[in-house]
Image (tube, coloured by chain):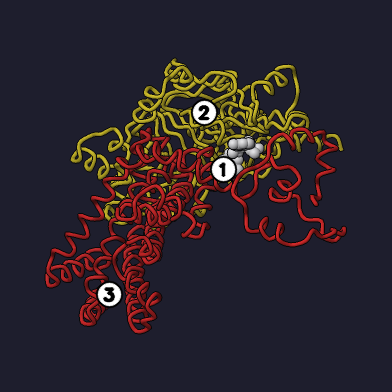
Chain colours: A yellow, B red
């Protein structure tokens, strides 16, 4: 496994006039609702501990108001915490002075915004070159970098347009190019695709995954959409009312939700399309009589099609040519039903 | 005789009241009172316990007249130290106003008018507007109002330039600090609502009427308000998301101000400049009372000497100037808006 790039430890954020006193109450065990009623302070985040690995996509998911935006803004310190640590490459960014912080934002992090947040009075090319321009690089180098990334996100030919002349999807491509042109390891994306319509959104997700295959950035992606989360996430963090309900491998969370909140989330999903063979296979020991060979990353949907719905079949699972497991079609069908509904069924 | 004598006595002030008599000058009201017979006052006639009334009951209490004298004396007392500070500070204003007037009048009309037209073209790119300005100036020159019109214009240029130089930075500081905004907003409200004559009074005491900075200050105090207000507003209205993006990519405060906040606030700032220009024009006419040259002098002459024709024609010239200034600044504002619409 890769190194931990960003580590959030014991993070609390309280909004209000006197967060430190309120923090005392929270440390003594007061909950969010009481804190708001009795002291007028909002407990934005409570005891967040998340490790984000280099080169992975960490998706933070939660409903509106669960504190996603607040959390991501702690990573580049657009918001300062009430308590806790944010370690980046092992350094606590809360110890940084203004100059170090600026340096970090200029070179080590970039951000993509839900509402694009492009400079309306600058051209697409100038917007894409914003980061190197802030760093004071030479005009020629800035233009080259901006041009390169605009081409990469499919916007060649629009250099001299202004943002308001582009569609939302194209504007967000500029936002992506701007973030990429900063050449930073870490990319923060706050509901970057939420404002786009479904088809464009899916295109942008594909674009991001394709870029990620080459670039291996540490991406922290925020969404309130489970499909998007499952498509992008290597590591999934689920937030509710400012605390982490569950985090881990997305497939694992899908199969073992530990909270009714998450069960609700996952109950509407098309599980056949999201779950992969590797998540439901069993170890290879002594089975024979395979109906065929499948890949560990195939979706269950592929398998159902392949088996023509025959639940008696059994497949050998391989990854890169090695045998890694066995898939029983019966186990597959069982996995299609969310855990809690199955339980309720047996009680009735 | 005195209504409040017994009340003051009850307060135990009897001794103090009789201790010294007021030997200030006698007011007209007192003379009349002395001349007339003492009246018995009924309850209906009880006067308000003002300074003058109380003075009658108790001479050591000052009369209203003494109070205004006191204010005058206090003002005269601080005048000299204040003047010692303000005079050198404001001297450049006199130079700028006089220099600009001299320059505008030194240039022959066949140079100055084309220069002005060129300026109009540069900021508006509108042929129609250039044509309108040309016709207006030819008309003004034809009816022999060229010199006063040019003088008025020169004063407006200088005062607007200084208002912008002062107002934009003040507006920026105001946008950054809520405390400063709380302090300045009432001051700006006051500057804008006070009848202009009211602050001409202390200015006349402070500076001599022969100095051009006197009217310069009066105009600027009045005209600087909108540019301050709209700069503040414009910067506060800049899209928060864009500011957040600027921060997230590590812009310095300076890069943010020059590269994001001012450009995005520019339409508002320019709307402020437009109003500043219009208010300078309004004030430069009034300021002819304190020796500002230009069209206002002719209007004043029209009023004072009942020269109806002179007054009306110069009044029309002022309207013409107002239209020109307004149209030209609005057109350049519209150009800014289209080049950076969101
Ligand atoms: N500056 C603030 N002052 C007070 N409360 C705040 C502030 N910022 C956020 N909050 C509160 O913190 C909570 C989390 O807000 P946040 O914006 O992080 O939610 P979110 O998960 O990003 O929601 P959304 O999906 O709507 O963007 C909300 O209850 C919000 O009211
Ligand atoms: Mg949010």
Q: Nearer the viewer, mark 1 or mark 2?
A: 2
- Res B83 quadrant in image: top left
First in sequence: mark 1 vs mark 2: 2
Residue B204 seen in the current view: yes
| Residue at point 33%, 34% (across, down) | A182
Residue situated furthest bottom in the rendering: B309
Of B268 and B249, nearer the camera is B268
Q: CA distance from mark 1 to mark 2?
A: 25 Å
Asked whether the residues under marks 1 and 2 belong to the same chain, the reply is yes
Asked whether the residues under marks 1 and 3 belong to the same chain, the reply is no
Q: Which residue is mark 1?
A: A227
Q: Residues within 10 Å of mark 2 (few under 14, many from 20)?
A: some
Q: CA distance from mark 2 to mark 3?
A: 53 Å
Asked whether the residues under marks 2 and 3 belong to the same chain, the reply is no
Q: Residues within 10 Å of mark 3 (few under 14, many from 20)?
A: some
Which chain is home to disc 1? A
Secondary structure under tag 1 reads: helix
Of B89 and B224, nearer the camera is B89
Q: Nearer the viewer, mark 1 or mark 3?
A: 3
Mark number displayed over residue A74: 2
Secondary structure under tag 2 reads: helix
- Indicate yes or no: mark 2 CB to ligand 1 under 8 Å: no
Q: Position of residue B223 (x, y in %)?
A: 40, 56
Q: Which residue is mark 3?
A: B129
| Residue at point 48%, 33% (across, down) | A295
Which chain is home to disc 2? A
Q: Residues within 10 Å of mark 1 (few under 14, many from 20)?
A: some
A341 relative position to B318: left or right: right
Q: Is residue B212 above or below residue B171?
A: below
């Amino acid at each position: 496994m890769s190194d931990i790039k960003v580590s959030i430890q014991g993070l609390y954020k309280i909004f209000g006039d006197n967060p430190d006193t309120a923090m005392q109450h929270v440390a003594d065990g007061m909950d969010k609702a009481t804190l708001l009623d009795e002291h007028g302070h909002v407990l934005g985040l409570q005891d967040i501990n998340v490790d984000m690995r280099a080169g992975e996509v960490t998706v933070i998911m939660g409903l509106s108001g669960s504190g996603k935006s607040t959390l991501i803004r702690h990573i580049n310190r657009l918001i300062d915490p009430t308590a806790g640590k944010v370690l980046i490459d092992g350094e606590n960014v809360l110890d940084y002075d203004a100059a170090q912080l600026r340096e970090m934002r200029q070179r080590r992090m970039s951000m993509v915004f839900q509402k694009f947040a492009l400079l309306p009075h600058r051209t697409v090319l100038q917007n894409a070159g914003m980061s190197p321009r802030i760093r004071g690089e030479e005009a020629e180098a800035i233009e080259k970098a901006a041009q390169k990334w605009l081409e990469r996100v499919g916007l060649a030919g629009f250099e001299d347009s202004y943002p308001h002349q582009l569609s939302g999807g194209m504007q967000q491509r500029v936002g992506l190019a701007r973030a990429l042109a900063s050449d930073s390891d870490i990319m923060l994306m706050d509901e970057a695709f939420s404002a786009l319509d479904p088809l464009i959104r899916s295109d942008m997700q594909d674009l991001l995954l394709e870029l990620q295959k080459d670039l291996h950035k540490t991406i922290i992606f925020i969404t309130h959409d489970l499909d998007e989360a499952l498509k992008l996430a290597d590591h999934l963090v689920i937030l509710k009312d400012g605390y982490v309900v569950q985090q881990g491998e997305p497939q694992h969370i899908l199969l073992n939700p530990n909270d009714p909140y998450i069960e609700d989330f996952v109950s509407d999903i098309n599980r056949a399309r999201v779950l992969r063979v590797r998540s439901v296979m069993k170890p290879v020991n002594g089975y024979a009589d395979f109906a065929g060979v499948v890949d560990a990353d195939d979706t269950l949907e592929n398998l159902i099609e392949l088996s023509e719905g025959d639940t008696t079949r059994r497949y050998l699972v391989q990854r890169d040519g090695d045998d890694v497991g066995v898939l029983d079609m019966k186990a597959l069908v069982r996995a299609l039903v969310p855990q809690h509904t199955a339980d309720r069924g047996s009680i009735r | 005789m005195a209504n409040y004598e017994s009340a003051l006595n009850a307060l135990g002030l009897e001794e103090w009241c009789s201790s010294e008599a007021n030997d200030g000058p006698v007011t007209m009201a007192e003379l009349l009172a002395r001349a007339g017979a003492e009246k018995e006052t009924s309850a209906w006639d009880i006067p308000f316990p003002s300074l003058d009334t109380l003075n009658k009951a108790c001479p050591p209490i000052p009369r209203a007249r003494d109070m205004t004298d006191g204010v005058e004396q206090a003002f005269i007392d601080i005048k000299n130290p204040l003047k010692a500070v303000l005079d050198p500070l404001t001297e450049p204003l006199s130079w700028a106003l006089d220099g600009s007037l001299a320059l505008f009048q030194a240039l022959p009309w066949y140079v100055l008018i084309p220069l002005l037209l060129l300026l109009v073209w540069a900021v508006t790119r509108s042929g129609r507007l250039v044509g309108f300005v040309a016709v207006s100036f030819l008309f003004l020159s034809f009816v022999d109002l060229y010199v006063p019109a040019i003088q008025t214009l020169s004063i407006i240029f200088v005062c607007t330039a200084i208002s912008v130089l002062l107002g934009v930075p003040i507006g920026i500081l105001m946008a950054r600090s809520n405390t400063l905004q709380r302090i300045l907003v009432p001051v700006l409200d006051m500057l804008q609502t006070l009848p202009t004559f009211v602050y001409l009074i202390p200015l006349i005491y402070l500076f001599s009427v022969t100095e051009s900075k006197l009217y310069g200050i009066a105009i600027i105090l009045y005209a600087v308000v909108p540019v301050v207000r709209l700069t503040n507003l414009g910067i506060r209205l800049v899209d928060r998301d864009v500011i957040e993006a600027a921060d997230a990519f590590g812009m310095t405060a300076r890069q943010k101000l020059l590269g994001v906040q001012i450009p995005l606030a520019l339409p508002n700032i320019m709307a402020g400049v437009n109003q500043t220009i219009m208010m300078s024009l309004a004030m430069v006419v009034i300021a002819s009372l304190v020796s500002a040259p230009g069209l206002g002098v002719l209007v004043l002459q029209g009023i004072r000497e009942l020269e109806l024709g002179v007054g009306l024609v110069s009044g029309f010239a002022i309207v013409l100037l107002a239209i020109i200034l307004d149209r030209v600044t609005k057109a350049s504002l519209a150009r800014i808006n289209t080049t950076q619409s969101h």
